[in-house]
C-alpha cells in the first residue's frame, strides 16, 4: 500500500515509519523541513517537501503520489512541556492541525485516496462515571484552554466525517510516553518531576490515559485495515494523577511530588492545570482491542512501582 504521512517527523511519525516499512508499505512523508527530510530518509521514508499550510503545495504533492491512504499526524508542539511553552505554541498548533486537515481533505477524492487516518485525542471526554468509550461526547464546558482543545478535535473529526468518498478513522490517542516524548524518566517531564515542579493538585483524582509511542504506532498501522470510525488508543489501566505521578516520580529517581490545594494551583498554574489534575476522565480501549487487536503494554511506571512494593 502507498501511504502518505503528514507530520512524520514527530514522535509518533518516527515510530510509525519503520513499522509501516516492515509491513512492506511504500511510505511517503510530507515535511517542510529539509533537516527533517534527511531524518525521514534515514528511516526509509520518501520525503516530500511541502508545507501542510500551503493548499496548492499539498494538492500537488498528494496528486503526484496518489497514495492509497493518508495518515495525518500534524502537530506543532513545543520541545518542552511547560505551561509557558504550551501557551506560546497553542495558536500555531491549532492552525497546523485545522488548516492542515482542511488542505489534506480537500484533495483526497481527486487523488484517489481511499482511507484517511487522523490523530485525535482520547483525554478530552466529558466528565462522568467510569472510563469513556467512543460514544461519549468530548468536553463542552471546562477551563478556557481545555475547552478550546476539545473543540479543535471536535472540528477536526467533524470535517473529516463530512468528507465524501473516504474511509475515515479517528485515532484518539492517550498521552504519549516513551522515546521521543515528554513523558520519559530522562526527558522533560522527568527533569521537572526531579525539580519538584509538578505537584499533585487537590486530591489528584483526574484520570490520565497514556499510551506508549510504539503501541500507538502499532495501532496506527492496524488502522489501515480496520472498520472506519473512532478508536481510543490508550493504556489498559488509566490512573488518577496522584497514582501515576507518584509512581513516575519514583521511577525517575525523584522525591515524592509536592501537594498543593486547588486554590494554590489556580494562582500558580492556572485553571487548565487544575482541570487536568482533578477532572480529567480516562478512556476505555475495549473497541480498539476488539476491532484492531490492540493490546497495550501496562504503564511502565505503575508496573515498576508495583514490583518495588512486592
Image (cartoon, helix red, strand yellow):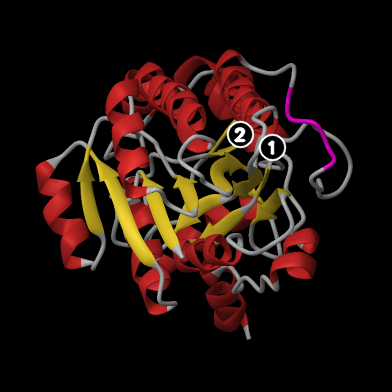
Regarding residue 256, the answer to whether it shows in the image is no
Tell me the residue that label 2 is attached to: 276
- Relative height, residue 266 to residue 7 (above, below): above
Q: Magenta segment range?
A: 135-139
Separation of marks 2 and 1 at Cα, in angstroms: 5 Å
Which mark, residue 280?
1
Regarding residue 111, the answer to whether it shows in the image is yes
- Relative height, residue 290 to residue 202 (above, below): below
For image coordinates 52% across by 71% down, the residue present is 300
On the image, the x and y values in percent for residue 175 come to 53, 49
Report the number of discs. Answer: 2
For image coordinates 33% across by 31% down, the residue present is 58
Residue 243 colored in magenta in the image: no
Quarter of the rendering containing residue 148: top right
Quarter of the rendering containing residue 46: bottom left
For image coordinates 51% across by 46% down, the residue present is 113
Residue 138 colored in magenta in the image: yes
Does dot 2 land on a helix, a strand or a loop?
helix
- Relative height, residue 196 to residue 148 (above, below): below
On the image, the x and y values in percent for residue 119 come to 53, 43
Quadrant of the image containing the C terminus: bottom right
Quarter of the rendering containing residue 145: top right
- Asked if disc 2 and disc 1 are in contact, CB closer than 8 Å, the reply is yes
For image coordinates 43% across by 52% down, the residue present is 67
Amino acid at each position: 500500500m502507498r501511504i502518505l504521512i503528514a507530520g512524520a517527523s514527530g514522535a509518533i511519525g518516527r515510530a510509525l515509519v519503520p513499522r509501516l516499512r516492515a509491513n512492506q508499505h511504500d511510505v511517503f512523508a510530507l515535511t517542510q523541513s529539509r533537516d527533517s527530510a534527511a531524518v525521514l530518509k534515514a528511516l526509509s521514508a520518501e520525503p516530500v517537501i511541502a508545507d501542510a499550510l500551503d493548499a496548492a503545495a499539498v494538492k500537488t504533492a498528494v496528486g503526484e503520489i496518489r497514495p492509497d491512504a493518508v495518515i495525518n499526524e500534524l502537530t506543532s508542539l513545543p520541545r518542552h512541556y511547560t505551561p509557558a511553552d504550551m501557551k506560546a505554541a497553542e495558536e500555531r498548533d491549532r492552525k497546523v492541525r485545522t488548516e492542515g486537515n482542511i488542505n489534506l481533505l480537500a484533495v483526497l477524492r481527486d487523488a484517489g485516496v481511499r482511507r484517511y487516518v487522523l490523530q485525535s485525542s482520547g483525554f478530552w471526554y466529558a466528565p462522568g462515571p467510569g472510563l469513556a468509550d467512543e460514544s461519549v461526547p468530548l468536553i463542552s464546558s471546562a477551563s478556557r484552554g481545555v475547552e478550546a482543545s476539545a473543540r479543535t478535535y471536535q472540528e477536526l473529526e467533524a470535517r473529516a466525517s463530512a468528507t465524501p468518498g473516504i474511509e475515515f478513522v479517528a485515532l484518539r490517542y492517550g498521552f504519549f510516553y516513551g522515546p521521543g516524548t515528554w513523558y520519559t524518566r530522562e526527558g522533560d517531564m522527568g527533569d521537572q518531576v526531579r525539580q519538584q515542579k509538578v505537584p499533585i493538585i487537590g486530591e489528584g483524582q483526574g484520570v490520565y490515559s497514556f499510551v506508549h509511542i510504539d503501541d500507538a504506532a502499532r495501532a496506527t498501522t492496524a488502522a489501515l485495515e480496520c472498520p472506519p470510525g473512532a478508536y481510543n488508543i490508550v493504556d489498559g489501566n488509566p490512573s488518577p494523577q496522584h497514582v501515576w505521578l507518584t509512581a513516575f516520580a519514583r521511577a525517575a529517581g525523584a522525591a515524592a511530588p509536592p501537594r498543593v490545594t486547588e486554590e494554590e494551583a489556580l494562582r500558580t498554574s492556572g485553571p487548565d492545570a487544575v482541570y487536568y489534575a482533578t477532572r480529567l476522565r480516562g478512556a476505555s480501549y475495549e473497541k480498539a482491542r476488539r476491532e484492531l487487536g490492540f493490546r497495550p503494554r501496562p504503564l511502565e511506571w505503575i508496573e515498576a512501582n508495583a514490583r518495588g512494593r512486592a
